[in-house]
Amino acid sequence: LVIAHTVIGCGSPGKQGTHHAHGSPLGPEECEATKKALGISEEDFYIPQAVQSFFDMRKEQCEKLHSKWQETFNRWRSAHPELYEVFKKMEARKLPEGLEEKIHKVEIKNPIAGRSAAQEVLQLLAEELPYLYGGSADLSGSDCTMLKKYPLIEPKHFIGRNIKYGIREFGMATMASGLWLTGMIQPYIGTFLTFSDYMRNAIRLAALSRFHVIYQFTHDSIFLGEDGPTHQPVEHYAALRAIPYLHVFRPADSHEIKGAWLEALKYAGPTALIFTRQKLPLLAESQKIPFSEGVARGAYILKKEPRPCDFVLMATGSEVSLAMDVAKELEKRDKSVRVVSMPCWELFDKQPQEYKDEVLGGDLGQRVSIEAGVSLGWHKWIGMEGIAICMETFGASAPAGDLAQEFGFTVDAILERLLA
């Protein structure tokens, strides 16, 4: 145990040993007094000769070290031209041409859990992007972040591309920011969505700094089941959406998941990708819409109304298929319904007003949101008179089907609210 006895603001006659040395500038008079007390010249920006000499020496040393490193690198480059091509790709961190088409063609057997669909996309991305490095906080088997063809990074064995961070989510998130700052790595990291709370400050700083870090959060709602309310996120969509410059995606099916990963790679900032534990059906309507006209716009019309709207149903993630089922039942009751999938609010906010009006503008009848999280933020889209099908309590430990019944996420329960 090393105990360091220090004095805050040491040398400042009027402020040392007090909180004033931390919370406010010394000020001109106290600066002058401090310099006198420390025997330092009162000249502005004065650099003592001893300090200047030390930095001159270090500059010379570092120039020699860099020159030696460059010679070693040049020999390596000549000896390993194929690896040097990989090095150049890592240094550039550019998306290759044709990547969107390759992502679109990834074969995924539906229905499939959101986390599993994302893992299929990741395997392709690992082949296309040599600078893509992944990792997880002791949950790679559950959050599906493992790059299967590549080994782990271990002591004295750095050729791998999978990092085991251990159960330290905040440390993982800060290290991911550091990996981005290498200039040669595109990091992504994963854990359960509810554990994003442990990472919040690191995510916030990544957003503030525009670090291109991708966070893959799984087990995204009460529908993860029996693990119960400690693991069931309800407030987390809203909490992440509140962070400026962070893009938050909650895709509805494997098609939207492909598009979400593509947009995360394109965006010059951090992205939170939120995926389900439970299986999702592939929506016939979503796969007809190109990424550029759907996911890339943040929200889009998944189902158009046959005549002036009685209802517009807005949803994200697993609740989009529920919204489609509700729409079918409403139309059996002679109601006209539009369904809007909203995988990324932040991208939708950036769209031209003309497009936003096309999707959600005008008189669309009763506005309804369906999302298994708190309603905070939804009234921006549904208005104060809108109906929010949401979670305003914590969840419970039970099978997903029982939870849907208990918390009102069934077709019958929603119809009862809308037609009351």
Image: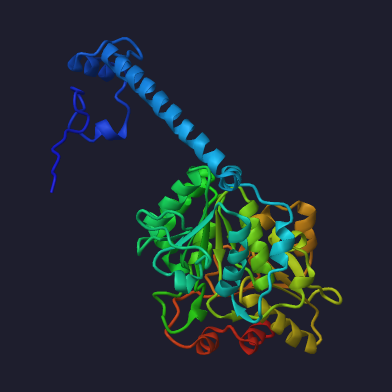
What x and y, as percent, mark residue 345?
63, 60
Say left or right for 413 vs 419: left
Horizontal side of residue 219 vs 34, given as left or right? right
Q: Residue at x 37, y 55 (%)?
A: 171
Can you give x and y, in whole percent of width and height, for residue 141 in the image?
46, 73
Front in this rendered view, residue 246 or 256: 256
- Residue 392 location (% of width, % of height): 49, 74
Q: How is the image coloured?
A: rainbow
Residue 14 drawn at (x, y percent): 20, 24
Residue sitting at x 81%, y 73%? 304
Number of marks in the rendered image: 0
Location of the C terminus by quadrant is: bottom right
Residue 303 picture quarter: bottom right
**In front of the other: 62 or 16:** 62
249 is higher (above) or lower (below) than 13: below
Front position in the image: 216 or 207 = 216
